[in-house]
Image (tube, rainbow, N blue to C red):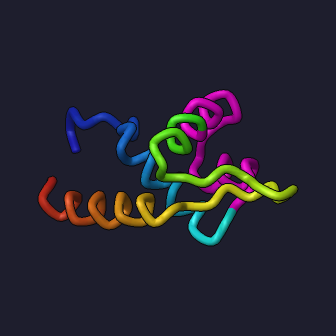
Amino acid sequence: MIGMSLKRSKLEITADILRVAVGGARKSHIVYQANLNFQIIKNYLKELINSGLLQSPTNGSKLYTTTEKGLQYINYYEGMKQFTL
């Protein structure tokens, strides 16, 4: 791994967030499980909701939930990882 960056890509962070939110997760749970901070998560949540990958909390719930489109993203991401070093 000489010369490889330890920083995660936006694609990887997105997949991590969506994995945590399968079945529903609070913002704080997503932050800790995806190893992010509250400042960064705000933009990701907004972007993922706007793109239809994540459902925002509804009806008094505080849970973010991965949508069907988000589950497809996770599957495509996992398949893509098989072809990278």
Q: Nearer the viewer, residue 27 or 81?
A: 27
Residue 61 or residue 19, whichever sits in front: 61
Residue segment shown in magenta? 25-45
Q: Position of residue 46 (x, y in %)?
A: 59, 35
Within the image, what quadrant is residue 60 found in?
bottom right
Residue at the right extreme of this rendering: 60
The mark total stands at 0
Q: Position of residue 45 (x, y in %)?
A: 59, 40
Q: Give the answer, above or below, for where 29 lies relative to 51.
A: below
In the picture as drawn, the residue positioned furthest to the bottom comes out as: 23
Q: Is residue 17 left or right of residue 12?
A: right
Question: At 59% from the left edge and 47% from the top edge, which residue is drawn?
Answer: 35
| Residue at figure coordinates x 67%, y 55% from the top left | 64
Image coords of residue 54 (percent x, y): 55, 52
34 in magenta = yes
Could you tell me which residue is drawn at 43 percent across and 54 percent down?
Answer: 15
Magenta-drawn stretch contains 26: yes
Observer-nearest of 25 and 60: 60
Residue 48 placement, left or right of 61: left
Location of residue 57 with respect to 24 vertically, above or below: above
- Which residue: 24% across, 37% down? 4
Residue at the far front in the pictured view: 59
**What percent of the width, then of the height, locates residue 7?**
39, 35
The overriding secondary structure of the stretch rendered in magenta is: helix
Quarter of the image where the N terminus is located? top left
| Residue 68 found in image quarter | bottom left
Corner quadrant of residue 40: top right
> Going by the image, does 2 lie left or right of 42?
left
